[in-house]
Amino acid sequence: MLKLVRKMNAMVAAVGRYGMALPAAAKMYGVVGYCWGGTASFNHAVFNAPGMKAAVVYYGSAPAGTEIAKVKVPVLGLYGENDQRVNATIPMADSTMRAIKGTFVSKVYPGAGHGFLRAQDQPANRAASLEAWPETIGWFKKYLR
């Protein structure tokens, strides 16, 4: 499994390098992911690729404490209240990021479930989506300047 995580991070870093090499591009990038991709985004923050400056995690699990302690970029975690499996990883992420003096902001949306951005036919999920997306844009505007 670790080999696959390393390969995924190397591939994301390669995309980041490509994007940063474009003539009009800034020399930094951020990642955002949903569910498995949210977990992958948090793992990419652990990877600390050159140029990576911020991560947004939608309902993705946090890495293990020993790994999360390697994070050097600000991470925004957006979670649905009705997602106990993923939400169980929030306290450890929060305490570890505080211990390393890192930036981790988590928001748990009332009544929303896992995959709330996708399942907007449910009122709580729609409300969470309407609030979370501007948070995502704001996070990147703040840290990718």
Image (cartoon, rainbow, N blue to C red):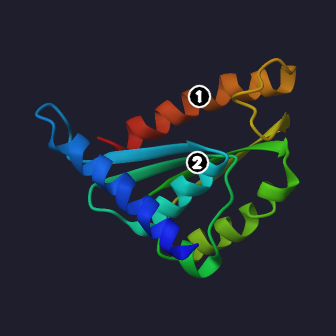
Q: Nearer the viewer, mark 2 or mark 1?
A: 2
Disc 1 on helix, strand or loop? helix
Q: In which quarter of the image is the N terminus?
A: bottom right
**Mark 2 burial class by Cα count in 10 Å: few <14, some 14-19, many 20+:** some
Identify the residue position indicated by label 1 in the image. 133
Q: Where is residue 78 in the image (x, y as percent from the top left)?
A: 67, 44
Above or below: residue 141 compared with residue 78: above
| Side of 74 relative to 88 (left or right) | left
Q: Position of residue 66 (x, y in %)?
A: 58, 82
The answer to which of 59 and 75 lies nearer the viewer is: 59
Q: What residue type is labelled 1?
A: Trp
The answer to which of 133 and 64 lies nearer the viewer is: 64
Above or below: residue 74 compared with residue 63: above
Identify the residue position indicated by label 2 in the image. 37
Q: Is residue 3 visible from the viewing direction of this image?
A: yes
| Side of 51 relative to 143 (left or right) | left
Q: Where is residue 120 in the image (x, y as percent from the top left)?
A: 77, 21
Q: Position of residue 118 (x, y in %)?
A: 71, 27
Q: Which amino acid does label 2 sit on?
A: Gly
The residue drawn where x is 51% and y is 43% is: 32
CA distance for labels 2 and 1 = 16 Å
| Side of 2 relative to 80 (left or right) | left
Q: Quadrant of the C terminus?
A: top left
**On the image, which quarter does residue 50 sit in?**
bottom left
Label placed on residue 32: none
The residue drawn where x is 73% and y is 61% is: 90
The answer to which of 134 and 33 lies nearer the viewer is: 33
| Side of 20 relative to 23 (left or right) | right
Disc nearer the start of the sequence (2/1): 2
**Mark 1 burial class by Cα count in 10 Å: few <14, some 14-19, many 20+:** few
Disc 2 on helix, strand or loop? helix
